[in-house]
Image (tube, grey):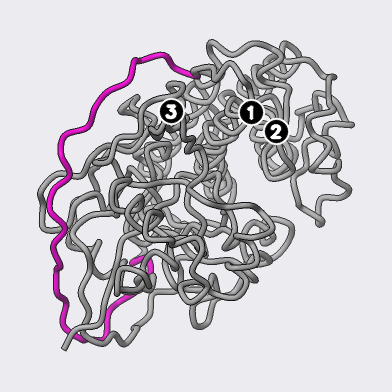
Amino acid sequence: MQAVPQRRSRVPFESATSAQAGLAARYRAVRRASTALADGLSDEDCALQSMPDASPVKWHLAHTTWFFEVFVLERFAPAYVPAEPRYRVLFNSYYNGIGEQFSRPLRGMLSRPGLDVVRRYRDRVDEALCALLAGASLPDEALALLELGTHHEQQHQELMLTDVKHLFSLNPLAPAYRDRGARRAAPAAPLEWVGFEGCAAGIGHDGSGFAFDNELPRHQQPLMPYELASRPVTNGEYRAFMEDGGYARPELWLSDGWTARGTQGWTHPAYWAARDSAWFEFTLRGLEPLDPARPVTHLSQFEADAYARWAGARLPTEFEWERAAGAAACEGNFAESGALHPEASPALPLAAMYGDVWEWTASAYAPYPRYRPAPGAVGEYNGKFMSNQYVLRGGSCATPRSHIRATYRNFFPSAARWQFSGVRLARDAG
């Protein structure tokens, strides 16, 4: 779920210096936020890997540091000496242009370097980066890569939370990542439909501020009249689908989804558990009674699609979603709230378009017309993943607020469930 930033234009020295100072402040804030996510975790918590799709917290802390070291310091700080040359392989995620990578499914086997060493590695790179930013005006490319690195790290902050949740869910003790106590949500607002006329919608980033390259270039997308649900689907509504035999009715499922349901043994969303005739949900606050008013989460795209068909609706396209979200305030339940779980949606014309749960769309993750990846290794950030993935929109309760916008395109394979992924219904109109 990554991409390359658009290029900056050259600005006067005073403005460039101001922008550089602002970027330095953002860098420090993002780096502090990452280390804070590891507070309260043991060394063992930070070293374990629960499945191949997840990574240890220690690896996330090291890889995000590696990004700044390799893409910024090695190019723009000639006097910088890498902390450990072997880290170039150890903490390389998938950049073939950089070189060899350590096997992703085996990251949990890296007992060395220890968490204390990784923290010192972060400190060393932070010191060098802050010195670089405090010096002479940097070239546009360096500033663009630094800004990209901060957004890259925010993506990994969300992954740290989702990966820890999956890890803790496998522990019979059902430990809490943050013990804030269970809270009952307010009653869910009635589901209503918001209509949109057909048009040629402007899709993609308009060039103001940061954007990943998969949000570009902006283009016109024809849309037929449609309606969008006023809020995401709730736990209670999804449970009705289950009780109506939703997981046992092949007519509701895509072929690959029906196969995944069978091979994976899906009978309910991830992290749900039935105990003594009652449903519970594992959360980052531990095991809690399932609240019917909260948005259902940890669904695959296959499950979201099957539910939509059962409900007599469909999933929105990413273009329908973006057009609707453009009129909604970018406010919601993000990582900064500390809730770390979806909250019930307020009674608004379009509620929770941002935060709470990533919303699956019916759109395959593909390049926009005239998209071109950046040259070199940094071009691998995004373009090479435009195959066998579907787009999600809107951010989640684990997404940093400053990281999201209406044009942001997240993407995962259809069977992925460990992210905070949910569903908002759509239907044709007119």
From the top left corner, tell me how far across and down residue 211 is, in percent.
Answer: 44, 57
Discs 1, 3 touching: Cβ within 8 Å: no
Residue 285 sits above or below residue 16 on the image: above
From the top left corner, tell me how far across and down residue 292 is, in percent.
Answer: 27, 41
What secondary structure is found at the residue carrying circle 1? loop
Residue occupying the point 79% across, 34% down: 107
What secondary structure is found at the residue carrying circle 2? loop
Say if the magenta span includes residue 184. Answer: yes
Q: Place residue 202 in its image quadrant.
A: bottom left
In space, the residues marked 1 and 2 are separated at their CA atoms by 8 Å
* Mark 3 lies on residue: 276
Residue occupying the point 34% across, 71% down: 316
* Label of residue 189 in the image: none
* Mark 1 lies on residue: 170
Residue 391 sits above or below residue 137 on the image: below
Q: Residues within 10 Å of mark 1 (few under 14, many from 20)?
A: few
In space, the residues marked 1 and 3 are separated at their CA atoms by 20 Å
Asked if residue 73 lies left or right of residue 324, the reply is: right
Asked if residue 84 lies left or right of residue 245, the reply is: right
Instruction: State the residue in front, 87 or 423.
Output: 423
Q: Place residue 313 in its image quadrant.
A: bottom left
* Mark 2 lies on residue: 50
Residue occupying the point 45% across, 65% down: 215
Point out the stretch of residues depicted in magenta. 177-206
Q: Identify which amino acid the numbered label 2 is placed on.
A: Ser
